[in-house]
Image (cartoon, helix red, strand yellow):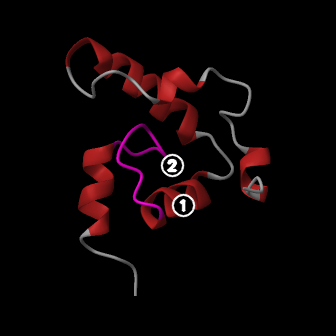
Amino acid sequence: MMMLDWTRRAACLGLDPELFFPISMEGPSQSQVERAKHVCAGCPVREPCLEYALATRQADGVWGGTDPKQRRELGLHPAA
């Protein structure tokens, strides 16, 4: 699969992917989730990342500054 253009400008590009895929979204892993979301907060491609995660139904990890629960909630209300 060809690399999506927006991924080349992602703030997470050189970071350890494990930061964005914690073992859990609760408990001790919550600080890891918050660190990942902090990286996303300043990312220039946050919106296309989130759009990709919603379109491909990414069930795990932090994408576009959202965790799986947030993405499930967004998926219930797709954009017109």
Above/below status of 76 relative to 46: below
Above/below status of 59 relative to 12: below
Residue at horizontal 33%, vertical 21%? 23
**Amino acid carrying mark 2 in the image:** Gly
Quadrant of the drawing holding the N terminus: bottom right
What element does badge 1 sit on?
helix
Res. 52 mark: 1
Above/below status of 35 relative to 37: above
Quadrant of the drawing holding the C terminus: bottom left
**Horizontal side of residue 8 vs 67, given as left or right:** right
Q: How busy is the neighbourhood of tag 2: few (under 14 within 10 Å), some, or many (20 plus)?
A: many
Asked if marks 1 and 2 touch (Cβ < 8 Å), the reply is yes
Is 1 or 38 nearer to us in this picture? 1
Q: How busy is the neighbourhood of tag 1: few (under 14 within 10 Å), some, or many (20 plus)?
A: some
Question: Residue most toward the front?
Answer: 1
Residue at horizontal 27%, vertical 24%? 24
**Mark 1 to mark 2 CA distance (whole Å):** 9 Å
Question: Residue most toward the left?
Answer: 27
Residue at horizontal 65%, vertical 33%? 12
Helix, strand or loop: magenta stretch? loop
Is 38 or 66 nearer to us in this picture? 66
The verdict on residue 16 being magenta is no
x then y, percent, for residue 33: 38, 27
**Amino acid carrying mark 1 in the image:** Tyr
**Horizontal side of residue 2 vs 68, given as left or right:** right
x then y, percent, for residue 55: 47, 67
* Region rendered in magenta: 56-67
x then y, percent, for residue 3: 76, 52
First of labels 1, 2 by sequence position: 1
Which residue position is annotated with label 2? 64
